[in-house]
Amino acid sequence: MGFVEFGSMALIILVLIVVILFLSFVPVGLWITAFFSGVKIKISELVGMKLRRVRPSRIVRPAIKATKAGLNLEISGLEAHYLAGGNVNTLVDALIAAQRANIPLQFERAAAIDLAGRDVLEAVQVSVNPKVIETPNISAVAQDGIEVIVKAKVTVRANIDRLVGGAGEQTIIARVGEGIVTTVGSSRSYKEVLENPDSISKVVLDKGLDSGTAYEILSIDIADVDVARNIGARLQTDQAEADKRISEAKASERRAMALAHEQEMKAEVEAMRAKVVEAESQVPIAMAEALRAGNIGVVDYYKIKNLNSDTDMRETISKASDRNKKKENK
């Protein structure tokens, strides 16, 4: 008897384990929810999702949402999008939003936009409700050399057909900045920019800057215009400073050449003085030889000595007179 009871309990436990494993592997509750929500899906399909390592709730719940919104989406298509790395829930929300806004958006197009890395739901929302892109401060210089700082606000609307392969917000900002720089640069004076800032908007808007982008530009509004530096005057100042440095360099070069020439002249004078001293040192020897040879007499010798003494005295008097004059001038 005891053995029979033990066997019955073991059977019951085994059955419970099997039931628990079945319920844990087969989402019966999710299938019941889908059935009463009008989503046609078989339990075998849910088991297949489990085997393919796909969370059935990630597919079934968006499918329920789409069915309630009146969209006819295939479970296989949603699962394929999930396996490709897409966001099924966002995709279904975007399709529902597009349907409510009467925007023609097919499942394949929405899936391609999502897989391209763009937020398809945000794209639909921006297509319905345009958003404003604010540019950073853009520096531009008018023809009179005055720098102007311009800040613009660009109102854009998403273009669903160009979301795949179209450029993003950064391209819009870059093109608007280029248009502002060109328009301000063609103005004769910065005063024209300050008086008519809307002229910038009109010129830039007519350039078709949204070509090849994922957006359609609705308007470009100049939010702020400020006067900055006088670039023209600064350039002239820099040019004058550069010319001054060039002139100083040339003057230094001429000064160095003059000093070198002066040193050369001094060297030549010293060389001549050395030759004079050398020649003077030969005079006594020559006179002695002349006396021995009888070419000059003693009287002639003393006349030459007197002449030299007279010359030395005159040079001494001249130097003393020059010193006195310098003292008087001081």
Image (spheres, rainbow, N blue to C red):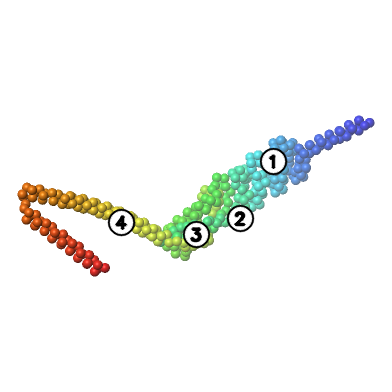
User: Which residue position holds label 4?
Assistant: 251
User: Which residue position holds label 2?
Assistant: 129
Pick the front one: 279 or 174:
279
Instruction: Report if the CB atoms under discs 4 and 1 are less than 8 Å apart.
Output: no
Secondary structure under the numbered disc 3 in the rendered image: strand
- Label 3 to label 2: alpha-carbon separation: 26 Å
Residue occupying the far bottom of the picture: 328
User: Which residue position holds label 1?
Assistant: 75
User: Which residue position holds label 3?
Assistant: 150
- Label 4 to label 3: alpha-carbon separation: 45 Å
Residue 43: image location, x then y, percent: 75, 38
Marks 2 and 1, the one that precedes in the sequence:
1
Instruction: Report if the CB atoms under discs 2 and 1 are less than 8 Å apart.
Output: no
**Residue 218 visible, this angle:** no
Q: Quadrant of residue 248?
A: bottom left
Secondary structure under the numbered disc 4 in the rendered image: helix
